[in-house]
Amino acid sequence: MSPDTIIATDRLNLWYGDTRALVDVSMEIPDRKVTALIGPSGCGKSTLIRCFNRMNDILPGCRIEGKVMYHGENIYDNGSDPVSLRRRIGMVFQKPNPFPKSIYENVAYGPRVHGIRDRRTLDSIVEESLRRAALWDEVRDRLSRSALSLSGGQQQRLCIARTLAVEPEVILMDEPCSALDPIATAKVEGLIDELKKQYCVIIVTHNMQQAARVSDYTGFMYLGRLIEFGGTTQIFESPRDELTENYITGRFG
Amino acid sequence: MTLPLPRQAKQGRLIPARTGETLIRLILLSCAGIAIVTIFFILAFLIRDGYPVLSETGITSFLLGTEWNPTGYPVEKFGIVPLVAGTLCVTLGAMAIAVPLGIACAICVARLAPPAVRAVVKPAIELLAGIPSVVYGFFGLIVLTDWIRATFGVPSGESWLAGSIILGIMALPTIISVSEDALSCVPREFSEGSLALGATHWQTISRVIVPGALPGISAAVILGMGRAIGETMAVLMVTGNAAIVPSPLWNVLSPVRTLTGTLGIEMGEVATGSMHYHALFGVAVVLLVITLAVNLVATTIIGRLREQYAPGRPCGNAVPGSRRASLLSPEMRERAKIILLVAVLSLIGLPAAGIAGYAGCVFLFSLVALSWRRLSPRTTQKIAFFFISAATATVLLILAVILSDILVKGLPALSFEFLTEPPRDLGRSGGIFPAIVGTLYLVAGAIGFALPLGIGAAIYLSEYRAEGKLTKIVRTGTELLNGTPSIVFGLFGFAFLVLFLKFGVSLIAGQITLGLMILPTVIRTTEEALKGVPVSLREGSLALGATQWQTVSRVVIPPAVPGIVTGAILSIGRAAGETAPILFTAVVFSQRFLPDSPFSPVMALPYHLYILATNIPGAEANKYATAVVLLLLVILFYAIAIGIRTHYQKNTHW
């Protein structure tokens, strides 16, 4: 394992009931880089990143074998606690899912849940997080308005701010732009570029151009297997596997 | 090849709807109007008969008079303050028991319980809803009041406390099922969003899911309250019925008398046309107004909720939680939450531990609450989950105690003779054959009256009308009719059918009264069943040139039949167990023979049980046996309905 690896999986397998959704996935994800997972629908990309913060735990009938090492510790070990794990590995979902609370309360939710009560501290966390999510200027004068009054792109950036407020190390993004228009998408992509200075970002995307634009490393998945993993330039310019080549040149998928 | 269609149909002009279609439309429209007309009729008749007491004694001395003594000499007193106080006391007490238990149980079922536990709890709650009120009253009278008498060392256990406990249990199913719906409706994205931020399950539930479901939960509480206010038989049997304001006001062991109880007791003995008679109708008007107001509030909230969660609609700013967000500062909210928590948690302790344990509980919970903020999220989660499971277990335990008491004592007294012979010696011996037959007659008539009307109304609402003013009015009318206390139906039946139409106390008067009572259930369940049929099927049929009625009758109704039948059977179960609507319209206590015409009175199981339990000493075995028969009959209907529903839910995939 190279020294800057933050998450590593070792022969990870996952079943939904009788369906095997992940097959022997082994990979190493570097810190402070953007890693993209691409592949056709149903190939297991989302399932894989949901393993990294144990969100699959809450789905009934889900069974996992293999290891996911985070800082050299298997997060599926018996003593490992998903709640404290999720504080360190944040997640942004496909559809923006702000809580039906005010903008302020959405961002303050995480810190509050983790015991911060001082109003001034909360204020500064909220402002800082919204700034880093490039949303502050648009919402600074309406923090007490409902988060649901924002546009889709703003909602998604709010969800990113909400994630940042917990100060995680890793940010998982599950097709964060698939519900957004091109302008909002460009904003979120610009944001991802900023974020990788401080965070490890793992992004699942349907959109190969997006993967090529934002990521440093790319993994191509097909039918639950990780077919190829490497530097983004290498994957897109000289893929080693025929399946990868077919997919990125648009011959299927 | 040409299709064998009449040429005219292909070449003729585009003719508008045929007369048959128009006729059907009119018939359905009049069915839909019946709910509204009934509500108006009920109000009109109650006010007509209640008006004299207002003009005679004056509206202030009626509403604000502190003495209710209709047979007083030389002056009769008709002040309803003690009755309103009784209703308020009993209802508030019931809510104090049912709200914490019910919400905790709903959280458990909706968000925590594994499927196996849910599979037990959900039918159990439906069963709890199915037990007839007279059976609750019977259990309360025999077991609960006795327990209160022994525990608190008072001469009689018939009290405010007993009424509140029984009513609390009866309000539970409403509160649980409506809150559970609301909790399950909170989208999964919210809980995933919260969990992904590292919140515990309990933090997610208490800070995201419950606030999101709050409008639905408050509607559930209000609906439960409406049910408690309107309940007659169970309350009347356990509250002691002294028309006094408890003194001191918090004396839960004092007997009280409710508005409904007054109607139930005095209506049967009053001389028609006397001032006392008019005063009772005045009481009914007050009761109706209170329940209408309560239900209107609940329906409005639920209606808003539906709009809010309607698919394809942006949620907008109308999310209640978000507006309230800025009202209280977080510190104040923390404090308010602690106070609320102490109140809620200590109230869970009330039914379990009784007053003695109560103080201890309050102390303990205050300790927990004070250190609450210092505890780790994981510890608070453990404590919260413990109380939630305890509350759920309590609900199941209550059901088990009631069922086992009645079954254990009643089943041995059952025999073939009991089921096939008329009663002897005022019901102390002999059987209940005429009562069984009477109940079946009543139920058959009620469903025969309500089913065609209800189905017609539902078809009109769902198939012939876009959502608009008219549907809104009809739907509101139906909801209001649904929330009308059953005793008010009884009074209306008495004033309109028995006296005004001169049917006398008769089978047919009882059938129509019961039919009106179950009409809303039939309409609603049918409408839901019709709505479950996908729009694409209708479009497919209409696109082939079928008329509206052809589409409805051949494409929409057939797949909806199981749903309609389920609703009908649930209504039958409800009608079979009701006492209050037939109390003055249809029943007599003892009759050796079966009714020979629709205009002769009948015996009925619930009424028989009521009289045996309250008026006939020494009928121990037969009391329990009657309760068992009634309980089993009603449960049988419910079980069939639930069975049909689950069967078709499993086998229908659109």
Image: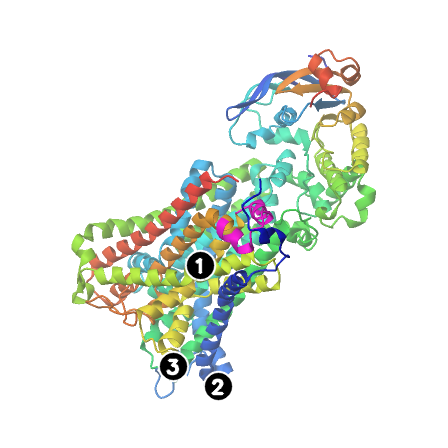
Give the amino acid type for the residue marked by disc 3 in the picture.
His
Q: Name the residue under label 2.
A: B55
Of residues A215 and B554, the one drawn nearer to the viewer in this rendering: B554
Task: Note whether B46 is above or below A28 in the view shown.
Answer: below
Q: Give the range drawn in magenta.
A: B533-554
- Evaluate whether residue B609 shows in this view: no
Give the amino acid type for the residue marked by disc 2 in the picture.
Ser
Quadrant where the N terminus of chain B is found in the figure: top right
Q: Mark 1 points at which residue?
A: B94
Q: Mark 3 lies on which chain?
A: B
Of the image marks 2 and 1, the number of the one nearer the N terminus: 2
Taking the image as shown, residue B521 lies to the left or right of residue A238, namely left
Q: Which colour scheme is used?
A: rainbow
Q: Find residue B276 and name its label.
A: 3
Disc 1 packing (10 Å; few <14; some 14–19; many ≥20):
many
Across and down, in percent, residue A32 comes to 76, 23
Circle 2 SS class: helix
